[in-house]
Each structure stands twice: as structure tokens, then as C-alpha cells.
Amino acid sequence: MLSSPMRTSRQYLALPLFGLLLLLVFPLHGAQAQVGAVPDPVRAGEGMVVSAERHATAAGQQMLAAGGNAVDAAVATGFALAVTHPMAGNLGGGGFMVLRLPDGETLTIDHREEAPSGATEDLYLDAGGAIDTDRRRLGHLAAGVPGTVAGLLYAHERFGRLSRAEVITPALNLAQDGFSISAREADRLNRYRSDFLNFPGSARYFTKEEPWAAGDTLVQEDLAQVLRRIRAEGRDGFYRGETAALIVEEMERGGGLISHNDLQAYAPVERAPVTTRYRGHRIISMGPPSSGGLALGQLFAAVEPFDVAALGFGGSATVHLMAEAMRRTYADRARYPADPDFVDIPMAGLMAPAYVRERMQTFDPERITPSDSVQAGVPPGWESTETTHYGAVDREGMAVSLTTTINALYGNKVAVDGAGFFLNNEMADFTAKPGEPDMFGLIGSEANAIAPGKRPLSSMTPTIVEDPEGKLLLLIGSPGGSTIITTVFQVILNLIDHGMELSEAIAAPRVHHQWQPEALRYERLGLAPDVREALQAKGWSLSGGTTRWGRAQGIMVVCDATDVLADDAGMRAAELAREGCVYEGVADPRSEGTAAGL
Ligand code: GLY
């Protein structure tokens, strides 16, 4: 049971008609649930883990059951994702961890990849000065120095309760004995087969004669060996010795840059989180080199003066307001944030409500402000000068919200031969050429230019929210490249302003705008025809409507829940009143994720 009961406002737990309607229109089909379907939350009093893959969630849950804390659970989940979710879980990538300790102290651990020491500013420009898109996306030259192993082990040594062997063994067993792959994993592996065939390790580990099928067992013996070395030697089992030699040999085979020195020099960095307030809540998120926390701060400051609840979920006025806030936020994102160890970022000025509101002075409820007329602002104090998210909480209230990535699905598509894990293509998150879009269409500036040892700008937004009384309320995050920030923003807005339950807030269709390109993107089934017409009348050009994005994973403290289904409501309320506050875990129905509690 939660040691200090945390009260949520009934505002979050109100019963929106929206959810009921969606349930009627899109009945649940387990893992096949469609966008709009509301997943059944998992509730438990002693702890909760949520991740994008069920074996990895189970590994974290096992740690809680063995007396481990949220960090033990998150670290075990992270290592397991490297085995069971190879498209994004990783040893060869990096990430950001946001922690809230039981006494309320907060911190972050930046274990983002770094540019190798041999990297140069013009690394991805051809002789004519044009960007060589393939070189920065595919293959050895796209890889930054991995940070995941150092980051997970750092967190574990600092805060974990169980032994290193205990938190790594579930992943090792999954690699050694194999696990049964999901239908979606089989589809993805089949889709990338031709890329994998270009690289001997990827071909050996992730292709076979016949197409992959749901239920196939994936055994990864070389990866198990790497995990065995990490279990025995800690970070030296990855950054030195046999594993490091395999990485460097792979680099030499394919013309990559990561050297033994780069690997040995890699260190995670503990940084203060970026915090902002929204309607009394404290939003604790990741600062640079991620743009996530800064952008969230700007987005919330931009919409706070408006009565978003009255404008309503899904209406053209709300979508218009959110998208105009996004447009201005992403214009600043293109200009200012980067690795804070390399550039000065006017964080206080950019986050100041007065600055953001001044940026919103040009907001017109009836008309768009075209992106060409919106440039990065000049904040006070400024002198010119596939990713995956998981989270864990424990009975003491320690909370870990962690987003990790190798960037594209299966990273640079190179699995290290002899080691069995994919490397990242995170170098593509640097600005290869100022003013030109990256693989997510994001524009960048000189501030995010490549330099040896520098960490590329990210959109990852692992976030923790406290309620107005300062108590733990929510852990949230998502993959999705440039859409990560707007996904986290909309989930929180859905909870605070639209009174949704967490399952509804995560399942609800999303929109996205990132300044450039001009079009406003919306998800499949995301905007009703009359809403689209109203937005077009304001001047919006719309795109999308066919795909979905993001796989948000959330855990929320719920103290007096009612249920969307009237028949069930009385029973659920009585159950919760008897048991006190519970953790509610929700995996996005857009993914094959799961939540599991204790
Ligand atoms: N690689 C995606 C991001 O960090 O934003």
C-alpha cells in the first residue's frame, strides 16, 4: 500500500462521455486495440511498472516482488527491453531518466549518446555541401557513443537496493533462453529485413529464411554473453574488454568513428530537472540536451491563460490554440536548445511566462499565424550571441520515468557482430546543416552542430507530475521523435483540463505541429469532419489522418476513482475506499506495451 496516501482531485476522475462513446464505437481487442480504444488500467497498491513490452514489464515487476525499489525495477526493465524490444530498447543507445525520491527530491540522469572524438561539423555533408541523408541515418557513421549501460548502472549504484546480478539476470535469461515475439515485432523485423541484410551481424541475429511470425522464439546468445560480462564487471563489461573490442571492430569494418577512448571516456551526467507549473501542478521533466522539459514549460505557459476546459476536448478552438502554442514553441526549439555543456541556453528567459505570453500576443482565435511570420523569439537575458518510454514506482513512492532510444527503429540497422545489439543513429539528431530539416523534419541551428564529445539535441520528455499539494501524481513519457513533446503535453492537458482518466488521456487522438512544416498533423480518427472544416476556415492546412504516433506509457496515483462504466462505478469506488490510494498503470493501445503491479 502507498505509505503516504496521495489524493488526486476528482477533476481527473470525472467520467467523460467521450470515453464511454469510444468504448462503444471501438470495443477492446487486447493488444490489437485501435486508437481511441480505452485500455483497461492495471491497479495495484505496492508498486507499478509500465513499458512497451510485456517480458520487460514482467522483469521490473519481479524486482518489486523481490523487495527492490523503483530504480531496481526500472533498471531491470531497461536491460530486458534491450533484449525483447530490439527496435528501441537498447544497450547501443542512450536516454534520459527523471527521478523523484520518496522525500520529494528530484533529479535527472542524462545518458544521451555523444559524438565520437573523430566527428566533425561537416560529417554528413557531401562535396557539394548537401546533406548525405543515408550517411547520417544508416550504418556505422551514424552511431554516437552509447550511454545506456553507463546510465542504468549509475542509477542502480546510486539508488538501487538489489544487487547488480539480480537486476540484470532477467534480461540475461530472456536473451539466453529466448522469448516469444509479438505479431508487431514479427512484422517490424520482416519490414526491415532488406536493411538488416546489409550488415553481417544484423543479418545473422535478426533475419532467417522464413519470415518471422508471432510466437517465434528469439534466442540471442551473443547478447546474453554481453549481459553476462556487464553483470560480472559492471560498466567495464561494456566500455572495456571484449564488448568494447567488438564495438570497435564493427566500427572498423564499416568506417565508423567510435574508438576505445570514446567508450572509456563516456560518463552519464546528473542534471537538475526543468520544472514548470500548470494550474497548480508541478511538472518535472528533462532539460537540455533534451528540449522536452523546456518545450513543455513553454506550451503550458502559452495555454494557461485560456479556459481550455471550457473550450473542450477535440474542438476546433482547442486544437487551434494548442497548435499555435506548438508552432511558437518549436520555432524556439529550432534556435536555442542544445548540449548545455557546449552552448549557453537562456533557459530562464525562454521559460518565463511573460516571455511566452508575449509570444502569444499574435495569437488570433480566428486565424492561423503562418510559420513564416513566426521566428524564434528573443527571451529576456539573451544576448545575441524509436525510442521507448518506461516507468516504475514503488511502495515508498520512489518514481522513475525513463525514455531511451537508438533513434530510428533498430537504430542505424547495424547489430554489432559478436555482441548482438543494434547501434544507434543518434548522430542524425545533430543539425547537419543549419536551417535544413532532420529526419523528423525539425529545423536546427548552429547551436546543435556536431562537435566531438557533444550530445545531440533530443525531444525525449520523460516527465513526473506532482499534484497541487506537492504529492506524486503521474509518470508519463512517449517515443515518437518530434511528436514526443506534444504527446506528453496533450496527455497532461487531457488529465488536468479535460478531466479524463489516464487510460482515456493516453488513448485519445492527438495532433502535432512543429513550426516547420506548416501543416497541422492529426491522427487517424483524430478530427471529426466538421472540426477539420472549422480549422481549414481558420487557415490551417491539415495532414495525416491515416497514421498514429507515440506510445505513451503512464502511471498515475488514483485515490478515489470512479469508472466510466456506470454499473462498475459503485464497486470500483468501494474497492478503492477500502484499499486507499493505488497506482494505475496504462500502456498506450498504440503499442504492445503492458503495465504490471504489485
Ligand atoms: N532520437 C529522438 C530524440 O532524441 O528526440
Image (tube, rainbow, N blue to C red):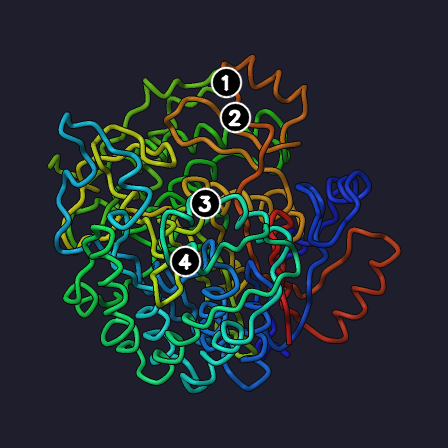
Question: Which numbered circle lies on residue 320?
Answer: 2
The extreme front residue here reads: 209
Q: Quadrant of the C terminus?
A: bottom right
Residue 480 is left or right of residue 373, and the answer is right
**Secondary structure of the residue carrying numbered label 3:** helix
Q: CA distance from mark 1 to mark 4?
A: 33 Å
Q: Nearer the viewer, mark 1 or mark 4?
A: 4
Q: In the rendered view, would you say 513 is above or below 54?
A: above
**Residue at the spot of label 3:** 484
Residue 494 is left or right of residue 439, and the answer is right
Q: CA distance from mark 2 to mark 4?
A: 31 Å
Q: Nearer the viewer, mark 3 or mark 1?
A: 3
Residue under the point 21% across and 31% down = 434
Q: Residues within 10 Å of mark 2 (few under 14, many from 20)?
A: many
**Secondary structure of the residue carrying numbered label 2:** helix
Q: Amino acid at mark 1?
A: Trp
Q: Quadrant of the N terminus?
A: bottom right
Question: Which numbered circle lies on residue 404?
Answer: 4
**Residue at the spot of label 1:** 540
